[in-house]
Amino acid sequence: MIAALLSLLAAFGDDQTEPRDKRVANLLQLTIELPETLTPEDRARSLTTLEADMATIRSCAGAEQLAARYQRERTFAARIVQRSDYPVGWMPPNLHGELVGLPTGHPTKVFGDRTTPRILIACTEPRLLPNGAAPPAP
């Protein structure tokens, strides 16, 4: 479901067999698709705009509203993907540390490549599964 996140996980080459953190959270990923034909100056301006806009997000609904605004104004091509009960312990250590250190609803720093910047938001506080079992690998 969060194919881009799974691709990111695979790209980090993490070969762990047990999650570092046995909690799960409902996640939202906002992905922006920038044209490859942008000049370096236009790309820098776009990223500055994105970072400023994304820094104002304080909830998953806020991310959805921003994506809708981008689509409506044709500012950027935006895509939202959500996943319930995602095992946060399977994330790369740097992304995991950043995400669980943020208040619920606040975005991570922008990550991804030059044409598809992304942010990730925990829509719920990370929590243990009811039976305390380790979540399955994503």
Image (spheres, rainbow, N blue to C red):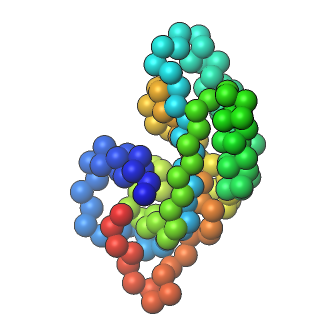
Look at 49% across and 70% down and name the residue there.
Answer: 85
Residue 122 horizontal/vertical position (percent): 59, 60
Residue 5 drawn above or below residue 124: above
Residue 22 in the image: above or below residue 44? below
Q: Residue at x 46, y 19 (%)?
A: 36
- In the rendered image, residue 133, in percent from the top left (x then y), is placed at 39, 84
* Residue found 33% across the figure and 67% down from its top: 137
- In this view, the residue farthest toward the bottom is 131
Q: Is residue 93 visible?
A: no
Is residue 6 visible from the viewing direction of this image?
yes
Write down the quadrant of residue 47 in the picture: top right
Quadrant (top left, top right, bottom left, bottom right) of the N terminus:
bottom left
Residue 124's spot in the image, x, y percent? 62, 67
Image vertical order of residue 42 relative to residue 29, above or below: above
Which residue is outermost to the front? Answer: 72
Task: Indicate whether 30 appears above or below 137.
Answer: above
- Horizontal side of 49 relative to 6 (left or right) equals right
Which quadrant, please, contains the C terminus?
bottom left
x then y, percent, for residue 32:
55, 35
Residue 109, by quadrant, is top right
